[in-house]
Amino acid sequence: MDKRILLPTDFSENALNAIQYALDMHEKEKCEFYLLNVFRVKGYSTKSIMVPEPDDVDYEAAKKYSLSGLDQQMEILNLRDENPKHRFYQISQFNSILYGVKNVIDKKDIDLVVMGTKGAGGTRSTIFGTNTVNIMEKVTECPVLAIPENVRFSPPKEIVFPTDFKASFKRKEIQVLLDIAKNHKSAIRVLHIMESTKLSKKQENNKVLLDHMLDMVDHSFHTMSDVKVQKGIDTFIQSRESDMVAFMNKKHMFFGSILSNPLVKELGYYSEIPILVLKDIT
Protein backbone atom coordinates (compact mmCIF):
# COMPACT_ATOMS: atom_id res chain seq x y z
CA MET A 1 0.00 0.00 0.00
CA ASP A 2 1.25 3.47 -0.89
CA LYS A 3 2.36 5.72 1.95
CA ARG A 4 -0.12 8.53 2.56
CA ILE A 5 1.38 11.89 3.47
CA LEU A 6 -0.53 15.03 4.44
CA LEU A 7 0.97 18.39 3.47
CA PRO A 8 -0.80 21.36 5.10
CA THR A 9 -0.16 24.58 3.21
CA ASP A 10 -0.96 28.26 3.57
CA PHE A 11 0.77 28.93 0.21
CA SER A 12 3.78 30.52 1.92
CA GLU A 13 7.37 29.86 0.87
CA ASN A 14 7.84 28.08 4.18
CA ALA A 15 4.97 25.68 3.43
CA LEU A 16 6.24 25.08 -0.10
CA ASN A 17 9.71 24.33 1.25
CA ALA A 18 8.25 21.68 3.59
CA ILE A 19 6.35 20.15 0.67
CA GLN A 20 9.51 20.02 -1.44
CA TYR A 21 11.33 18.42 1.49
CA ALA A 22 8.65 15.74 1.78
CA LEU A 23 8.78 14.93 -1.95
CA ASP A 24 12.57 14.69 -1.94
CA MET A 25 12.66 12.57 1.21
CA HIS A 26 10.19 10.08 -0.30
CA GLU A 27 11.59 10.21 -3.84
CA LYS A 28 11.99 6.44 -4.11
CA GLU A 29 8.76 5.48 -2.34
CA LYS A 30 5.23 5.09 -3.71
CA CYS A 31 3.27 7.87 -2.04
CA GLU A 32 -0.04 9.66 -2.14
CA PHE A 33 0.40 13.31 -1.18
CA TYR A 34 -2.59 15.29 0.09
CA LEU A 35 -2.20 19.06 -0.12
CA LEU A 36 -4.52 20.64 2.44
CA ASN A 37 -5.52 24.28 2.69
CA VAL A 38 -8.02 25.39 5.29
CA PHE A 39 -9.83 28.69 4.99
CA ARG A 40 -11.86 30.95 7.26
CA VAL A 41 -14.88 33.12 6.54
CA LYS A 42 -15.34 36.57 8.06
CA GLY A 43 -18.03 36.50 10.74
CA TYR A 44 -17.87 32.74 11.25
CA SER A 45 -15.80 30.71 13.67
CA THR A 46 -14.73 27.17 12.88
CA LYS A 47 -15.70 26.32 16.46
CA SER A 48 -19.20 27.79 16.13
CA ILE A 49 -22.33 25.78 15.41
CA MET A 50 -23.06 28.38 12.74
CA VAL A 51 -21.65 27.28 9.40
CA PRO A 52 -21.66 29.51 6.32
CA GLU A 53 -23.89 28.40 3.47
CA PRO A 54 -22.07 27.33 0.29
CA ASP A 55 -23.69 30.18 -1.63
CA ASP A 56 -22.58 32.80 0.92
CA VAL A 57 -20.56 35.48 -0.93
CA ASP A 58 -17.69 35.53 1.59
CA TYR A 59 -17.63 31.72 1.74
CA GLU A 60 -17.44 31.42 -2.03
CA ALA A 61 -14.68 34.05 -2.21
CA ALA A 62 -12.61 32.27 0.46
CA LYS A 63 -13.20 28.90 -1.17
CA LYS A 64 -12.17 30.27 -4.58
CA TYR A 65 -8.97 31.73 -3.14
CA SER A 66 -8.19 28.41 -1.46
CA LEU A 67 -8.76 26.35 -4.61
CA SER A 68 -6.79 28.83 -6.72
CA GLY A 69 -3.90 28.68 -4.26
CA LEU A 70 -3.86 24.89 -4.38
CA ASP A 71 -3.82 24.98 -8.20
CA GLN A 72 -0.90 27.42 -8.16
CA GLN A 73 0.95 25.24 -5.65
CA MET A 74 0.51 22.24 -7.96
CA GLU A 75 1.74 24.28 -10.94
CA ILE A 76 4.97 24.93 -9.02
CA LEU A 77 5.32 21.25 -8.12
CA ASN A 78 4.71 20.28 -11.76
CA LEU A 79 7.92 22.12 -12.65
CA ARG A 80 9.79 19.32 -10.89
CA ASP A 81 10.84 16.22 -12.77
CA GLU A 82 7.85 13.91 -12.89
CA ASN A 83 7.99 11.05 -10.40
CA PRO A 84 5.71 8.13 -11.42
CA LYS A 85 5.76 6.90 -7.83
CA HIS A 86 3.95 10.02 -6.59
CA ARG A 87 0.27 10.96 -6.82
CA PHE A 88 -1.23 14.24 -5.64
CA TYR A 89 -4.62 15.25 -4.29
CA GLN A 90 -5.92 18.67 -3.30
CA ILE A 91 -8.21 19.32 -0.33
CA SER A 92 -9.80 22.67 0.52
CA GLN A 93 -11.75 22.91 3.79
CA PHE A 94 -13.57 25.48 5.88
CA ASN A 95 -11.93 24.60 9.17
CA SER A 96 -9.19 25.44 11.65
CA ILE A 97 -5.78 24.07 10.72
CA LEU A 98 -5.71 21.65 13.67
CA TYR A 99 -9.13 20.14 13.05
CA GLY A 100 -8.63 20.22 9.30
CA VAL A 101 -5.49 18.12 9.72
CA LYS A 102 -7.25 15.74 12.13
CA ASN A 103 -10.18 15.40 9.72
CA VAL A 104 -7.99 14.44 6.77
CA ILE A 105 -5.89 12.05 8.86
CA ASP A 106 -9.07 10.23 9.82
CA LYS A 107 -10.67 10.18 6.38
CA LYS A 108 -7.57 9.34 4.35
CA ASP A 109 -5.75 7.11 6.85
CA ILE A 110 -2.68 9.36 6.77
CA ASP A 111 0.71 7.88 7.73
CA LEU A 112 2.67 11.11 8.20
CA VAL A 113 2.09 14.88 8.36
CA VAL A 114 4.87 17.11 7.01
CA MET A 115 4.67 20.85 7.60
CA GLY A 116 6.81 23.94 7.97
CA THR A 117 7.70 25.62 11.26
CA LYS A 118 6.88 29.20 10.40
CA GLY A 119 7.06 31.52 13.40
CA ALA A 120 6.54 35.21 14.00
CA GLY A 121 10.21 35.99 13.51
CA GLY A 122 13.60 34.53 12.83
CA THR A 123 14.82 33.99 16.37
CA ARG A 124 14.96 30.61 18.03
CA SER A 125 12.19 31.55 20.44
CA THR A 126 9.77 32.28 17.61
CA ILE A 127 10.76 29.74 14.96
CA PHE A 128 7.77 27.58 15.93
CA GLY A 129 4.43 29.12 15.06
CA THR A 130 1.33 28.43 17.14
CA ASN A 131 -0.20 26.21 14.46
CA THR A 132 2.91 24.06 14.21
CA VAL A 133 3.17 23.61 17.96
CA ASN A 134 -0.53 22.72 18.22
CA ILE A 135 -0.24 20.10 15.51
CA MET A 136 2.97 18.60 16.91
CA GLU A 137 1.39 18.34 20.35
CA LYS A 138 -2.28 17.66 19.68
CA VAL A 139 -2.28 15.46 16.60
CA THR A 140 -2.06 12.04 18.20
CA GLU A 141 -3.18 9.92 15.27
CA CYS A 142 0.09 9.80 13.31
CA PRO A 143 3.66 11.17 13.34
CA VAL A 144 4.39 14.78 12.44
CA LEU A 145 7.57 15.98 10.74
CA ALA A 146 8.25 19.72 11.16
CA ILE A 147 10.65 21.37 8.69
CA PRO A 148 12.40 24.67 9.59
CA GLU A 149 12.07 27.43 7.05
CA ASN A 150 15.57 27.40 5.56
CA VAL A 151 16.27 23.66 5.63
CA ARG A 152 16.54 21.89 2.27
CA PHE A 153 16.46 18.13 2.03
CA SER A 154 19.60 16.08 2.16
CA PRO A 155 19.64 12.49 3.40
CA PRO A 156 20.00 12.70 7.20
CA LYS A 157 23.30 11.22 8.27
CA GLU A 158 22.33 11.07 11.93
CA ILE A 159 19.00 11.20 13.77
CA VAL A 160 19.06 11.90 17.51
CA PHE A 161 16.41 10.02 19.51
CA PRO A 162 16.20 11.21 23.14
CA THR A 163 14.50 8.90 25.64
CA ASP A 164 14.41 8.23 29.37
CA PHE A 165 13.57 4.52 28.87
CA LYS A 166 10.70 4.84 31.37
CA ALA A 167 8.06 3.58 28.95
CA SER A 168 8.23 0.57 26.69
CA PHE A 169 8.38 0.88 22.92
CA LYS A 170 6.23 -0.59 20.17
CA ARG A 171 7.57 -1.12 16.68
CA LYS A 172 4.56 0.63 15.12
CA GLU A 173 5.36 3.75 17.15
CA ILE A 174 8.84 4.09 15.72
CA GLN A 175 8.17 2.66 12.25
CA VAL A 176 8.44 6.04 10.51
CA LEU A 177 11.80 6.62 12.22
CA LEU A 178 12.97 3.16 11.11
CA ASP A 179 11.78 3.81 7.55
CA ILE A 180 13.70 7.08 7.31
CA ALA A 181 16.85 5.45 8.69
CA LYS A 182 16.60 2.46 6.33
CA ASN A 183 15.76 4.47 3.22
CA HIS A 184 18.52 7.02 3.73
CA LYS A 185 21.08 4.89 5.56
CA SER A 186 20.84 7.20 8.57
CA ALA A 187 22.33 6.37 11.94
CA ILE A 188 20.08 6.64 14.99
CA ARG A 189 21.76 7.98 18.13
CA VAL A 190 19.71 7.18 21.22
CA LEU A 191 20.37 9.80 23.89
CA HIS A 192 19.58 9.40 27.58
CA ILE A 193 19.97 12.27 30.02
CA MET A 194 20.77 10.53 33.32
CA GLU A 195 18.58 11.42 36.31
CA SER A 196 20.28 8.95 38.63
CA THR A 197 23.49 6.95 38.72
CA LYS A 198 21.99 3.91 37.00
CA LEU A 199 18.91 2.71 35.15
CA SER A 200 16.16 0.84 36.95
CA LYS A 201 15.35 -2.74 35.97
CA LYS A 202 12.39 -1.49 33.94
CA GLN A 203 14.53 1.06 32.14
CA GLU A 204 17.16 -1.58 31.39
CA ASN A 205 14.49 -3.85 29.90
CA ASN A 206 13.10 -1.04 27.76
CA LYS A 207 16.59 -0.21 26.54
CA VAL A 208 17.15 -3.83 25.51
CA LEU A 209 13.80 -3.82 23.72
CA LEU A 210 14.67 -0.64 21.81
CA ASP A 211 18.11 -2.04 20.93
CA HIS A 212 16.37 -5.06 19.41
CA MET A 213 13.92 -2.90 17.42
CA LEU A 214 16.79 -0.84 15.99
CA ASP A 215 18.76 -3.94 15.07
CA MET A 216 18.31 -3.44 11.30
CA VAL A 217 19.74 0.09 11.25
CA ASP A 218 22.98 1.70 12.37
CA HIS A 219 22.45 2.87 15.95
CA SER A 220 24.22 3.55 19.21
CA PHE A 221 23.38 4.55 22.78
CA HIS A 222 24.70 7.67 24.52
CA THR A 223 24.29 9.12 28.00
CA MET A 224 24.78 12.54 29.53
CA SER A 225 24.57 13.56 33.17
CA ASP A 226 24.54 16.68 35.32
CA VAL A 227 22.74 18.69 32.64
CA LYS A 228 19.17 19.83 32.04
CA VAL A 229 17.30 17.88 29.38
CA GLN A 230 16.93 20.67 26.82
CA LYS A 231 20.53 21.81 27.25
CA GLY A 232 21.80 18.25 27.01
CA ILE A 233 19.99 17.53 23.77
CA ASP A 234 21.01 20.91 22.39
CA THR A 235 24.69 20.31 23.20
CA PHE A 236 24.65 16.75 21.85
CA ILE A 237 23.18 17.82 18.51
CA GLN A 238 25.55 20.75 18.13
CA SER A 239 28.64 18.73 18.95
CA ARG A 240 27.77 16.02 16.43
CA GLU A 241 26.14 18.25 13.81
CA SER A 242 23.15 15.89 13.74
CA ASP A 243 20.58 16.69 11.08
CA MET A 244 17.28 15.43 12.54
CA VAL A 245 15.82 14.82 15.99
CA ALA A 246 12.94 12.48 16.85
CA PHE A 247 10.79 12.59 19.97
CA MET A 248 8.32 10.02 21.24
CA ASN A 249 5.25 11.96 22.35
CA LYS A 250 4.41 9.67 25.28
CA LYS A 251 2.87 10.77 28.53
CA HIS A 252 5.13 10.66 31.56
CA MET A 253 8.31 10.79 29.49
CA PHE A 254 10.68 13.66 30.15
CA PHE A 255 9.97 15.39 26.86
CA GLY A 256 6.20 14.86 27.06
CA SER A 257 5.59 18.60 27.18
CA ILE A 258 8.83 19.75 25.58
CA LEU A 259 6.97 21.59 22.84
CA SER A 260 4.71 23.47 25.24
CA ASN A 261 5.25 27.13 25.96
CA PRO A 262 7.44 28.33 27.53
CA LEU A 263 9.55 25.22 26.94
CA VAL A 264 9.26 25.75 23.19
CA LYS A 265 11.54 28.75 23.74
CA GLU A 266 14.21 26.38 25.01
CA LEU A 267 14.30 24.17 21.92
CA GLY A 268 17.49 25.90 20.88
CA TYR A 269 19.70 24.39 18.22
CA TYR A 270 17.38 21.61 17.21
CA SER A 271 14.76 24.13 16.16
CA GLU A 272 17.06 24.53 13.17
CA ILE A 273 16.81 20.91 12.03
CA PRO A 274 13.74 18.79 11.20
CA ILE A 275 11.83 17.46 14.19
CA LEU A 276 9.99 14.14 13.94
CA VAL A 277 7.31 13.76 16.59
CA LEU A 278 6.37 10.10 16.98
CA LYS A 279 3.06 9.13 18.56
CA ASP A 280 2.01 6.89 21.42
CA ILE A 281 -0.40 4.32 19.94
CA THR A 282 -1.56 2.98 23.29
Image (cartoon, rainbow, N blue to C red):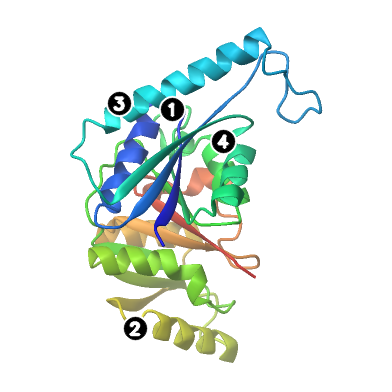
Q: Secondary structure at mark 2?
A: loop
Disc 3 element: helix
Marks 3 and 1: CB-CB under 8 Å? Answer: no
Q: CA distance from mark 2 to mark 1?
A: 41 Å
Where does the image place residue 66, in percent across and percent down from the top left? Answer: 50, 21
Front disc: 2 or 3: 3
Amino acid type at mark 3? Glu
Around disc 3, counting alpha carbons within 10 Å, would you say few (fewer than 14), some (14 to 19), or many (20 or more)?
few
Few, some or many C-alpha atoms within 10 Å of disc 2 (few <14, some 14-19, many ≥20)?
A: few
Q: Earlier in the sequence, mark 2 or mark 4?
A: 4
Residue 98, placed above or below residue 230: above
Residue matched to label 1: 121
Q: Which residue is mark 2?
A: 215
* Chain-order first, disc 3 or disc 1: 3
Q: Could you tell me if residue 35 is visible in this image?
A: yes
Say which residue label 4 marks.
130
Residue at 64% in and 31% down: 95
Seen from the viewer's position, the closer of residues 252 and 44 is: 44
Image quadrant where one finds the C terminus: bottom right
Q: CA distance from mark 2 to mark 4?
A: 37 Å
Q: Secondary structure at mark 4?
A: helix
- List x then y, in percent, for residue 136: 54, 49
Pointers 2 and 3 in contact (C-beta within 8 Å): no
